[in-house]
Image (cartoon, rainbow, N blue to C red):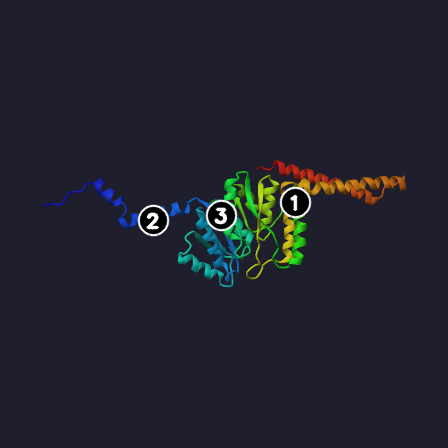
């Protein structure tokens, strides 16, 4: 019996059809793409730097709480170039498969917690993003509760864990310093702020996206996000939480980080509402200058002192800068 003759069209079709192994690879690649694009309810961004002694316990606590909540989630764990074995431990945990919703993302260089939180929020697949720390200080078992608040109260865009006590290092210095910075931020934003720089918070990603490029690399990133929301009229809810003593060694530098906190508060308010910062100073200088003019006219009828003119001119310059800055802010695309 002679073999059937194949037409040229049949030969071309056979040549174009992928083999079974190739088809399987294509199907697997397509499934992987779908998985990468999967939308989830919550993304937890967890920065880690030298947390080898307790980071596994923290991952267990967060995963257990979210597994029991019924929410779909990603637990994005970033290692910020740890040197104490945290990097190797996280790699082992990730490869073990114990936490299928954990995504391990090692950094090639140390960028700070602010950098990780910014990148993690930008790359998050969840509609709600949660920031927290891996040092056992925050009640991370309450994360589902924070997410539920955002679900139940549509007018709220961010839920912040307001700590009842201060358990950090340099406690005698941090308490008055934080109170002062918080009062400055409350005045500048026109809102009462129970906790300005809490590390535990949940927020709507779509609301936060425009402000993420403003986040600095260090600890003041949490302050920046709070001020950005408040300065732009977004509702922030403060939920009282317990705050435990830190596990491991603190990376907080009192002088440097306190200075950066104050600077960042002023910077954010200047960015959104420069009149709030500059105009009171200008009016004070003009008021003092006007009073000094009256004094000079009475004390020296034919002479106005040089320092009086300096007060008036400085006040006018600052007022002009304030008005110009406000014009720039209002003309900036939202």
Residue 125 in sight here: no
The x and y percentages for residue 169 are 62, 59
SS for dot 3: helix
Dot label at residue 144: 3
Left or right of 300? Residue 86 is: left
Dot label at residue 186: 1
The x and y percentages for residue 72 are 43, 46
- Residue 247 found in image quarter: bottom right
Front in this rendered view, residue 10 or 140: 140
SS for dot 1: helix
* The residue positioned farthest toward the bottom in the image shown: 84
Dot label at residue 50: none
> What residue is at 63 percent from the left and 38 percent from the top?
328
Front in this rendered view, residue 301 or 88: 88
Q: Earlier in the sequence, mark 1 or mark 2?
A: 2
Q: Are marks 3 and 1 in contact (CB under 8 Å)?
A: no
Residue that carries the numbered disc 2 in the rendered image: 28
> What residue is at 47 percent from the left and 51 percent from the top?
65
* Alpha carbon separation for disc pair 3 and 1: 28 Å
Q: Quadrant of the C terminus?
A: top right
Front in this rendered view, residue 251 or 167: 167
Q: Is residue 147 above or below residue 85?
A: above
- How crowded pointer 3 is (Cα within 10 Å; few <14, some 14-19, many 20+) is rated as many
Residue 31 in sight here: yes
SS for dot 2: helix
The x and y percentages for residue 323 are 69, 37
* Alpha carbon separation for disc pair 2 and 3: 33 Å
Q: Is residue 142 above or below residue 319?
A: below
Left or right of 32? Residue 41 is: right
Q: Nearer the viewer, mark 3 or mark 1?
A: 3
Q: Is residue 59 above or below residue 128?
A: below
- Residue 314 found in image quarter: top right
């Amino acid at each position: 019996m002679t073999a059937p003759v194949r037409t040229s069209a049949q030969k071309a079709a056979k040549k174009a059809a992928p083999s079974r192994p190739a088809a399987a690879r294509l199907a697997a690649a397509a499934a992987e793409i779908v998985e990468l694009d999967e939308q989830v309810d919550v993304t937890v961004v967890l920065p880690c730097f030298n947390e080898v002694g307790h980071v596994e316990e923290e991952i267990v606590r967060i995963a257990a709480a979210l597994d029991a909540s019924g929410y779909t989630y990603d637990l994005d764990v970033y290692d910020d170039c740890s040197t104490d074995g945290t990097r190797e431990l996280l790699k082992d945990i990730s490869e073990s498969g114990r936490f299928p919703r954990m995504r391990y993302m090692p950094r090639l260089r140390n960028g700070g917690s602010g950098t990780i939180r910014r990148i993690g929020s930008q790359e998050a697949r969840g509609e709600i993003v949660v920031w927290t720390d891996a040092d056992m200080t925050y009640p991370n078992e309450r994360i589902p509760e924070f997410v539920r608040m955002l679900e139940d109260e549509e007018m709220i865009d961010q839920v912040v864990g307001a700590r009842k006590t201060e358990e950090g290092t340099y406690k005698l210095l941090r308490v008055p310093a934080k109170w002062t910075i918080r009062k400055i931020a409350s005045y500048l934003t026109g809102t009462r702020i129970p906790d300005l720089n809490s590390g535990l918070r949940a927020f709507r990603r779509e609301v936060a996206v425009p402000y993420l490029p403003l986040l600095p690399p260090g600890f003041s990133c949490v302050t920046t996000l709070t001020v950005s929301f408040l300065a732009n009229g977004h509702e922030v809810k403060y939920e009282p939480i317990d705050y435990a003593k830190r596990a491991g060694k603190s990376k907080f530098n009192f002088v440097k980080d306190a200075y950066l906190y104050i600077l960042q508060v002023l910077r954010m308010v200047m960015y959104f509402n420069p009149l709030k910062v500059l105009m009171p100073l200008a009016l004070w200088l003009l008021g003092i200058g006007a009073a000094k003019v009256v004094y000079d006219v009475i004390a020296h009828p034919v002479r106005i002192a040089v320092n009086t003119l300096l007060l008036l001119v400085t006040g006018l310059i600052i007022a002009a800068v304030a008005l110009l800055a406000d014009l720039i802010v209002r003309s900036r695309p939202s």
